[in-house]
Image (spheres, coloured by chain):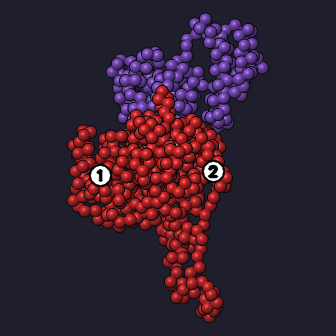
Amino acid sequence: MDTLSDLADGVVNGDESKVSALTAQAIDTEGSAKRILDDGLIRGMTIVGERFKAHEIFLPDVLMAAKAMYVGLGLLRPLLIEENVDSLAKVVVGSVQGDLHDIGKNLVGIMLKGAGFEVIDLGNDVSPSRFVEAAKEHDASVIGLSALLTTTMPVMKSVVDEVRSQGLGDRVKTIVGGAPVSEDFARKIGADAYGFDAANAVDKVKTLVGKN
Amino acid sequence: MRPTVRFLSDELLATILGEARTLLSKLGVEIHNEAVLTLLADHGAKIDVENRRVHLKGSLIDQALASVPSSFALYNVLGEQTHDFSGSNIHFTPGSAAINVLDDETSTIRTPDTRDYIRYAQVVSRCEHIASQSTALIPADVHERISDSYRLYLSLLFCEKPVVTGAFTIEAFPIMRDLQLAVRGSRESLAEKPLTIFSCCPSAPLKWSDVTSQNVVDCATMSIPVEFVSMPLAGFVAPVTLVGSLIQHTAETLSGIVISQLTRPGTPILYGGSPAIFDVRYETTPMGAVETMMIDCAYNEIGKHLGIPTQAYISLSDSKQLDAQAGLETSMGATLAALSGINNISGPGMLDFESCQSLEKLVLDHEICGMMLRMVDGIEPRDDVPALPRFEELIADHHLLISEHTRRHLRTEHLFPGPVIDRANRARWQEEGGTSLRQRAHREVERLLGEFEPSRLGVDVKADLTERMTVEARRYGMDSLPRCDA
Ligand code: B1M
């Protein structure tokens, strides 16, 4: 196995020390940090995502893999900056105003991070204007909204409307999810995507930012 | 002898309680409500202002526990007693606050409306083994800001049974209080004869939101009973072990008890919850998992040890339809809950991780509830000794079908579930249509709806309820309420 395949394997197994050692080795031997990122770390996480969807591995395995990936990413980051590699796409997430349920949203955030996105988590009970302001401030590509109460779902529409009314629709995409939310509802309020679970949310966000 | 089941040894129970108390004093509980922080500070709790963490000393917890009533009763809209929350008495209540209804005709889920809610209330009113109604659906044809109070309004209008409910916001509480005052007439008679129980949830781990802690305070102020619904999710926002989750549940519930009892000592409460294990394969909170049920039964033992009546979300299923999984998970939970003596057993009708109500499931579950109530009556001698005369009679007559002893005890000793549960022989079952359980359940729903008798609540009270609800609806831009004839 070459170093990068080995590195991907280390990520898959959530082996932090292996990922650390192999990333350091790859920095010495491979020329490009971008290649180490794509063919080592991200490739590992892609395999993890596929195995998770196939129910071969469970959530804690995904989180362990993500944690290991971040050890490698920490070593790579200065080189990525030097190489002028685009920073990771940013996603603002939060549970909408009036909603205190945040477990699903947290899970979506964790999985997005694991897939290599930079996540700005605004917490729960977040007003439409805070979502939009945060997206502008962080130059985020996606706003991810979570709602668990039928009574707070309408807030999602307010956020989508605010994104449009501020003329950000081309730059900032919206994705919605949560137990009472459906594909149909997402379409009705004009959201760009709907995710039925965390792995699905990651797939949809990748599509939104053109990475699928 | 009442049949019973136990999961915790005395020693383990004491350990769990001790660890929970240590958590509350050392780590504290996070509270996002200024008034509650002030209340606790006034009673000597140490507050870490920056992190909103309140450290609860053992003496404060003991003070609160000392004022909790060891029993209380509930009364229907007519003021008649329906519940006695004491000892090991059990009462069933439908699973609350579903997002969807399962439409039997189409086999699909949809958001409920006023018509669905009325049908639900009418069916519950005819289910003798289900002692209370819960505000089980959220009608989507009213403004979302009144959808919690509106379901209470419909319940009070269409069904006489007391109501297990809850507010989604702080602003919803006044109208939910006023609807109850309209039924009882005064604050005093509402306190004397409680009509509702409000579910109030801490957030795992060890946190109280502004809304839910304010709900606790508002209920206590009015002497409205509260059930604390702590939801540690084992393996995610709680330790993966059942003991670890129980420690967390105990700490969260004790903190709620402190808030309620310091607000108004003697406020009736149920030591409740809706914990679950977290299924790491599907990211779900299975209510039908055996471990979830074990946590429920075990915290019930802790509540009982503290001398407090109990509640749990335990007789429900995660299935998406009315199938074998729905029946088995519900009856497994109902059996354990009944044997444990959980006083208020929440769940009937519910599917899909507490998110979907089905009337067809409700009428099946109603029959399960009947069997459980029979079971806890236990095995008692009823004119059985001396046995000799009865056996002489049997041998002489070759049967006891019309014996005086049989006629005296048949209908109490044997329960006759049905028509959803089928006990016909195959030929008769075939002759009567060879129906599936689902078909029989649907037929039973229609039969109960056909038998519905309007609530005997006074016409003037009903008009008052409608007037108050209409005023509330106007605050949110609705000219009128959806049509419903009580
Ligand atoms: C950005 O893109 C995306 C993409 C995908 C996204 C996404 C975003 N967000 C989620 N997803 C998706 O991916 C996730 C991972 O697979 C999934 O997320 P989920 O969140 O669905 O799944 C989680 C991983 C696990 N699931 C959960 O965490 C939710 C489980 C249930 C049981 C639940 C819980 C745990 C809680 N609750 Co509440 N709670 C219920 C829930 C029942 C249910 N079946 O949903 C529900 C939602 N709650 C309800 C209620 C009524 C309430 N709750 C309340 C409180 C709580 C707790 C605090 C106790 C706790 C939440 C703790 C927390 N920190 O989040 C209160 C809410 C107060 C408020 N204003 O918010 C209160 C009002 C109760 C009260 N009277 O106090 C009901 C809603 C009724 C309705 N029709 O709207 C409810 C259906 C349960 C019930 N039947 O009563 C997908 O939906």
> Height in image: A91 above or below B156?
above
Mark 1–mark 2 contact, CB under 8 Å?
no
| Residue assigned mark 2 | B14
Vertical comparison of A19 with A156: above or below: above
Residue plotted at (23% across, 45% down):
B471
Chain shaded red: B
Name the residue at 35% across, 60% down. Answer: B193
Marks 1 and 2, how far apart at CA? 42 Å
In the figure, the shade used to draw chain A is purple
Callout 2: SS: helix
Which comes sooner in the sequence, label 1 or label 2?
A: 2
Within-10-Å neighbours for mark 2: few <14, some 14–19, many 20+: some
Q: Which mark is residue B179?
A: 1
The image quadrant that residue B263 belongs to is top left
Task: Please state which amino acid type lies under the numbered disc 1.
Answer: Leu
Which residue is at the front of the view, B443 or B81?
B81
Indicate whether B432 appears above or below B319: below
Residue B328 drawn at (x, y percent): 58, 57
Q: Are marks 1 and 2 on the same chain?
A: yes
